[in-house]
Amino acid sequence: MTGQLAMRGGAAIRTKPFPSWPIYGREEEDALLRVLHSGKWGRMDGQEVATFEKQFAEYHGVPYAVAVVNGTVSLRIALLAAGIKAGDEVIVPPYTFLATASCVLEANATPIFVDLEPDTYNIDPAAIEKAITPRTRAIIPVHFAGLPADMDAIMAIARRHNLTVIEDAAHAHGAEYKGRRVGSIGHLASFSFQSSKNLCSGEGGILLTADKDLHEKCKAIHNCGRMPGRAWYEHFVISGNYRLGEFQGAILNAQFARMDDQTRHRDEMGAYLHEQLAKVPGIAPQNRGRYPVRHAYHLFSFRYDASVYGVPRSTFIKALTAEGVPATEGYALPLHQQPLFVNKAFGPYTACLDTHPGMNFENLPLPVCNRASAGEGAWLYQSLLLGGKRDMDDIAAAFHKLYDNRAELANAR
Ligand SMILES: Cc1ncc(COP(=O)(O)O)c(C=O)c1O
């Protein structure tokens, strides 16, 4: 096997690795040892988690934050705090991680999947409006890949229909929408600090809100139903122990000091790479120009046109990775077509089956999402954007090489 393409024995565009993730140093080491030696390892004992909550809330210009064990649980708590219950409908996008929709089932409510904007893969406000029924109670927009969803349009719909908006900002640490920090716009916001995320502590999550009542509810639900100022053995609401530990709090304090610079850098490199890749036939980077944003670039999302290359997305991704540019097909099966939804394997959360017995998740008319999952959507990882312009040029060179050698690529099938 010889040819120009690295997947067929040619020289790869790049052999040097891109920056790895997470990035850490002495600060994280000192922070962990600080907690270790303090002997205060739980959030009820130490100050690390509380300090992080304060910093993160201030950064977003909101008064309240509650750190929790992950970004799945934070969504769950947000819905419980918002009073979502059996029979309710919650509007969600289908092109996202499982938790955005599973939290709705876990509130015993029904996720209503609506389609995406074709050029951003963010939830389409026009589709939200069409999906509203008397049962609708909330919307969970995801800032997909770190690109802010159209929050003005979403908040206007929410105001008209008296709905709660929970921003799923798991991809969007430090992102800005028309000059406002993502996570400060909806009634509640949820972030994840899982290991791949742009701010990470291995596992972790946080809730933000500007609403005192919602904050008190989140605080109680994350801490066994206890209320601030009341006794340790007094439990007021159904809940669990979702508290984040002090080791993770310490890591987050150290990582948070790096976050804003990293976010600015990714946004700058992402904008530059966007310009370069927009010149490659058959490649369309996620449109970041609908309104002013700072893009968090948790993912560098692009659309792939198989008709230009004559090979399916999987072959293109393999060829790109062989050139030294790691990429992925992303959410290759849409959420509404996952076995969970096809088989309605909802465990004890059965209200959805009673209120929506005819719901055929698998065949919902969601053409943009289906196209994205089936073969159009793909992404590069955030850590690539921590490189410099020369690294971005290598990425662009790999894409151009695949285009220039598309005849060879088609034979590689
Ligand atoms: C969009 C989105 N929402 C929620 C989550 C859940 O976060 P976690 O992995 O911390 O539970 C993730 C994480 O992958 C995510 O990507």
Image (spheres, helix red, strand yellow):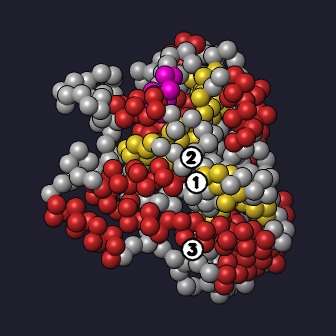
- The spot of residue 65 in percent (x, y) is 43, 44
Q: Residues within 10 Å of mark 1 (few under 14, many from 20)?
A: many
Alpha carbon separation for disc pair 1 and 3: 16 Å
| Residue 368 in sight from this viewpoint | yes
Q: Which mark is residue 172?
A: 1
Please state if 405 lies on the left or on the right of 321 as rendered: right
Kindly indicate the quadrant of the structure image that contains residue 403. bottom right
Image quadrant in which the C terminus is located: bottom right
In primary-sequence order, the first of circles 1 and 3 is 1
Q: Is mark 1 within 8 Å of ligand 1?
A: no
Image quadrant in which the N terminus is located: bottom right
Is 206 located above or below residue 288 in the figure? Answer: above
Residue on which disc 2 sits:
183
| Residue 406 in sight from this viewpoint | no
Which residue lies most toward the bottom here? 11
Q: Amino acid at mark 3?
A: Leu
Q: Amino acid at mark 1?
A: Ala
Residue in the image at 55% along x and 78% along y: 18
Residue in the image at 67% along x and 14% along y: 134
Is 137 located above or below residue 173 in the figure? Answer: above
Is 267 located above or below residue 135 in the figure? Answer: below
Q: Magenta residues, as a range? A: 77-84
Please state if 318 lies on the left or on the right of 36 as rendered: right
